[in-house]
Image: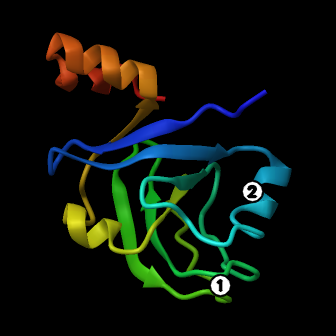
Amino acid sequence: MEKQTYCVYNQTRECFLCLGVTPADTTFSRLKGLIGKLKLKLDEGLWVVPSQGIHTLGVLFPLDLIYLDETLKVIHAIEHFPRFRIAPLRIQAASVLELPTHTIYSSQTQTGDQLIICAVDEIESRLKHGSFAQIKDQVI
């Protein structure tokens, strides 16, 4: 069975950060993370839930990191976090997004921005009906 993927939308900046985020929501998937991947495609990422920090030990490429609180508000962001390092812990974080480098820069995501993370099919139906703002009520 294939794992559900999610879209990440920055409601504050009105732009998508990623259309193919996979949750790492089990002990094993959080431990494994991106270890073993040769690279991260431009539109994929990992949503580590719960998490207050991550490591890139065994990860072969740098990442952009976005720390989120329980309401999916950005509380910390790190651009181009190097491989083979331990990221800082943020006690108030509920989850961390691991995204391709330049995602933060290209989306202009900043501390305080409100993100929406929802299933791909939910995004499609909202876009068809032109009611994207209402997605906020159905955030994971």
Frontmost residue, 91 versus 68: 68
Q: Residues within 10 Å of mark 2 (few under 14, many from 20)?
A: some
Location of residue 46 in the rendering, given as x and y in whole percent from the top left corner: 58, 54
Q: Earlier in the sequence, mark 1 or mark 2?
A: 2
Name the amino acid type tagged 2.
Arg
Residue at 75% x, 56% y is 30
Q: Is residue 5 above or below residue 66?
A: above
Residue 93: percent from the left, percent from the top? 51, 59
Secondary structure of residue under mark 1: loop
Question: Tag 1: residue type?
Answer: Ile
Badge 1 vs badge 2, beta-carbon distance below 8 Å: no
Q: Quadrant of the N terminus?
A: top right
Q: Secondary structure at mark 2?
A: helix
Identify the residue under disc 1: 86
Left/right placement of residue 24 relative to residue 96 reads right
Q: Tell me which corner region of the image, top left, top right, bottom left or bottom right, holds residue 52.
A: bottom right
Label 1, label 2: how far apart the Cα atoms are: 14 Å
Examine the image and state in which quarter residue 32 appears: bottom right
The residue labelled by disc 2 is: 30
Q: Nearer the viewer, residue 14 or 53?
A: 14
